[in-house]
Amino acid sequence: MRISLTGRNFLTLRDFTPDEIRYLIDFAAALKTKKREGGEKQLLKGKNIILIFEKSSTRTRCAFETAAYDEGAHVTFLSNSQMGKKESLEDTAKVLGRFYDGIEFRGYKQETVEALAEFSGVRVWNGLTDKYHPTQILADMLTIYEQFGSLAGRKLVFVGDARNNMGNSLMIGCAKLGMHFVALAPEELYPDKALTNEMTALAKETGGSVTITSSIEDAVKGADVIYTDVWASMGEEAELEERVKLLRPYQVNAEMIQKTENPNVIFLHCLPAVHDTLTDMGKLAYEKFGLSAMEVTDDVFRAPYSKVFDEAENRMHTIKAVMCATLAQTLQDSDGKPIVD
Ligand code: CP
Ligand code: NVA
């Protein structure tokens, strides 16, 4: 089946079919191989791209920049603009649409990235909002595919704050790709009911499943992937004390990994991770709560089964795939497999 994503925005995985998501993962894998071999043909030559960041970033910003440079595009980084202050979102979007071919946005509201798409008239990519983090999921799925050689039927357990961008987006990604998604969280941090119901119904069609539980034993047994995220996301730092109380029993540690009873289990984390006391957040966790790590212990983070740095690298290849697929005309064979020449 031929897939064309040219002219599409990338705001949430909800907008994409399972075939389109698999296409982006395959395309990223092909781009990764081509980069290693050398001689990448630049698909974004002459394109101008703007990266708007309301929130902090290391991976997402650098992935967009390096991917754009590899493909011959020019990049502007904007972190302090008039948008929403002296100028409406609509006006800013219209101005940026006159200058740029593509806009990446990271910030608080999903509505902002949607408005940029509505009013700019150019391609818009979601680099994280409070609700979704779709480019991260493509990197996660590519990493799982590299480790296991398949996605459908794999069991992924997301441990922690399951009502946030990562929990939501992983649930959507797993449901679309026929995977078994488990959110392991205290009831206070269970994901949105409407999203859970919608994804449970979708997973039935794709051969996957969605389970929400607070029981560690039930959740992790047979898991292929144990995944966690920070306990207090960007913008929610004031809730840290409450989160520590709720999530302390759900710290990913060697005992939890053992409970999977799967010798091939892998650990993933979108990063940044508070796995020791070397960061400001890590120091705070130690001084205020007596914790030497927060969401994941240092031994798990550094274990051979932890694939977090492969996952981080894959941010770049998958973001490159998203930009190229939506902005350029891409090639594929008669089976719809992407070709990178
Ligand atoms: N995983 C992720 O989005 O990392 P950054 O916040 O560093 O971009
Ligand atoms: N849930 C985290 C993800 C960081 C990549 C946050 O929003 O801060």
Image (cartoon, rainbow, N blue to C red):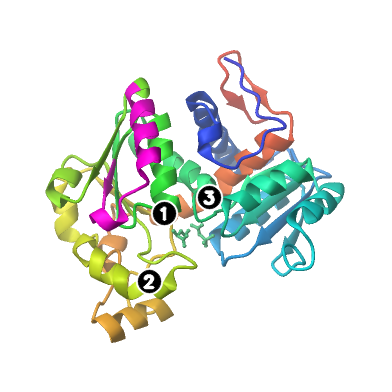
Outermost residue toward the bottom in this view: 287
Image point (48%, 66%), residue name: 234
According to the image, label 3 marks what residue? Answer: 315
Image point (28%, 57%), residue name: 188
Asked if residue 188 lies in the magenta stretch, the reply is yes
Q: Secondary structure at mark 2?
A: helix
What's under tag 1, amino acid-wise? Asn
Q: In the rendered image of this protein, does residue 309 appear above or below residue 206? A: below
In the picture, which quadrant includes the N terminus?
Answer: top right
**Which tag, 1 or 2, sits closer to the chain's start?**
1
Q: Nearer the viewer, residue 171 or 279?
A: 171
Q: Is label 1's Cβ within 8 Å of ligand 2? A: yes
What's under tag 2, amino acid-wise? Glu
According to the image, label 1 marks what residue? Answer: 164
Asked if residue 151 lies in the magenta stretch, the reply is no
According to the image, label 2 marks what residue? Answer: 239
Q: Is residue 31 visible?
A: yes
Which mark is on residue 237?
Answer: none
Which quadrant holds residue 41? top right
Q: Gap in Å between the C-alphas at discs 1 and 3?
A: 19 Å
Left or right of 224 in this view: 99: right
Image point (31%, 68%), residue name: 243
